Image (cartoon, rainbow, N blue to C red):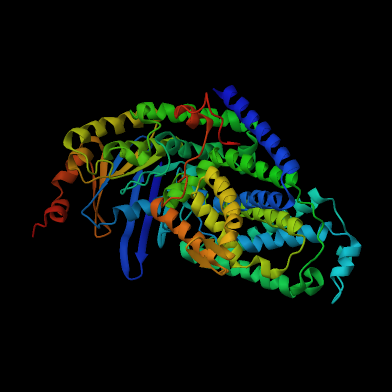
Amino acid sequence: MKTRNTLLTAGAIALFACLLWLADAKLGGYAMRILNLSAIYIVLSLSLNLVNGFTGLFSLGCAGFMAVGAYVSALLSMSPEVKEMNFFLEPLAPWLQNLTLPFALALVAGGLCAALAGLIVGIPVLRLRDDYLAIATLGFAEIIRVVITNLQSLTNGAQGLKNIPKYSTTWTVWGVAALTVAFMALLTRSSYGRELKAVRDDEIAAEAMGINVFRVKVTSFTISSFLAGVGGALLGHMITTIDPKMFTFMLTFNILLIVVLGGNGSITGSVIASIAVTVLMEAMRFLDEPLNLLFIKTEGMPGLRMVVFSAMLMAVVIFRQRGLMGDRELTWDGLAKAGLLPRKKKGARE
Amino acid sequence: MKLETKGATMRFGGLTAVSDFNIAIDSGEIVGLIGPNGAGKTTAFNMITGVYAPTEGRIRFEGRDITGHQPHLINKAGIARTFQNIRLFSTMSVLENVLVGCAVRERPTWINSVLRTPGYRRRDRESHDFARELLAETGLSELEDEKATSLPYGKQRRLEIARALASRPSLLLLDEPAAGMNPQESIELMDFIRRVRDRFDLTILLIEHHMQVVMGICSRMYVLDYGVTIAHGTPDEIRRDPKVIEAYLGVE
């Protein structure tokens, strides 16, 4: 059984890599960009799912930690010339001006700085629960944004950063997404994962069973911040410009939506919802343009796509309160039990 | 001396829930804590297990002062408990619930959990073995994959005991283990508690309303009323104590 699963996983990864290679070769830049954006959303939604779904902490601080990751990684990987061009109002701090790191290092540094921010925010804030925690994390994310706006000589303030090197290639973003999925799958199905879920299910019982609840919460929050930072950095290197206005609550809201749609506490759910939401958001763009439905003709209503999208969302939430997957996962054993395995090959990496 | 409290007092604002609580329990004893509703029994448990820090007084466990320590540290020191209103981990299976109890000894970190280091795998295997042994002991082996909260009430109580035992305590606190059980189940429970005590070399302090159960298995008992210890002695002494009769029956 175990070897079968390993083989299937290896096969699925190979198959997925082939498909990705094919897509990269055949699809145009626009389609690839959407596909890659969904990979980044996988990283971000898993980051939020770790705290919200698996540890039961209602956190809304995602965008703040993304901003930290995006800025750190961008500043560490831009060349001195680009930096000079960006910082025309006030020069960049001299120690950073000539520092240019390879992308991988800049990305990890972005994640680590976000994790540090998460640790500093988490220690006071994680003493709160539920909606109080949500409000506090939301506040901290805004504080991070305001600090970034005002650190002119370090972040270029409201002008933001332009010409960030475009390092987020198909292979990079999907590689990071695959690593994140593997990391989450291993973490949530380990003893430590059981401790996270114990804290989610019943804090008092978890404490009585010898679990240091506060420490588990802080650890989970810090890891989640790391992933958010990495996701933010990838986003920056994809769009190539970042500014503080990008990292408002709306961004957190989008990610929260993916997590809730996919199912709180389901890795598979987050992966499916990330792809589905990103693709649908683009696919429904035609709704904003003039429509000709034989009898009904409209002259383009910008925002109609969001109306339809919200209606679809409501339908999902009404008919499947716990999201698409609930807290279940797609596993090889599960597929085998459903009798799907010998014929079909489904479910990428689980 | 396994557990000793000296003048432990718990006040919530103007209300004294437990005052001057003194108990002393030797290794291997089964001791009962009884009293009418609202007498402060669960509050006494919460002081011992660190849920509340006593307002006054000291609590010593195996000679060490544990007054006001955090609950998870008290569990690590060797005190495990069950809850009056069952608190199982509702999204987890029966086996996983017990495995959470094992985790204390395992001390997993997120890094070695993700990397599945050899040490982690060995400890994880040991935990699985021990958890299955406990399930066999509690008669829940066939149900290991069931969702914990889908079990009938009596089995949920047993599972809570199995989970508490998984952290390898030397002192077990049971908060109304027979609540909601019929007489037959209560008698089985008494045998079960005795067997568990002998098998795992435990000392047990239990809160119970079922007089039949407490009188049947406790070597000594303490009686609380309005937070005050009104009597203490062997079951026979307690049965004859006028103060106890008055507290329970309200005799003038």
Residue A38 is situated, as x and y percent measured from the top left of the image, at: 64, 50
Q: Quadrant of the C terminus of chain B?
A: bottom left
Q: Residue furthest bottom?
A: A89
User: In the rendered image, which quarter is residue B95 located in?
Assistant: top left
Q: Height in image: B133 above or below A206?
A: above
Q: Residue at x 85, y 59 (%)?
A: A78
Residue B74 visible somewhere in the drawing: no
- A144 or A238: which is nearer to us? A238
Q: Quadrant of the N terminus of chain B?
A: top left
Question: Relative to B252, is A221 on the left or the right?
Answer: right
User: In the rendered image, which quarter is residue B176 located in?
Assistant: top left
Residue B42 is situated, as x and y percent measured from the top left of the image, at: 32, 53
Residue B79 is situated, as x and y percent measured from the top left of the image, at: 43, 43
Residue B210 is situated, as x and y percent measured from the top left of the image, at: 20, 43
- A230 or A56: which is nearer to us? A230
Count the marks: how many? 0
Q: Residue furthest front?
A: A294
- A321 or A292: which is nearer to us? A292
Q: Residue at x 43, y 40 (%)?
A: B92
Q: Height in image: B10 above or below A199?
A: below
Q: Residue at x 38, y 44 (%)?
A: B88
Question: Relative to B25, is A137 on the left or the right?
Answer: right
Residue B195 visible somewhere in the drawing: yes
Question: Relative to B130, is B160 on the left or the right?
Answer: left
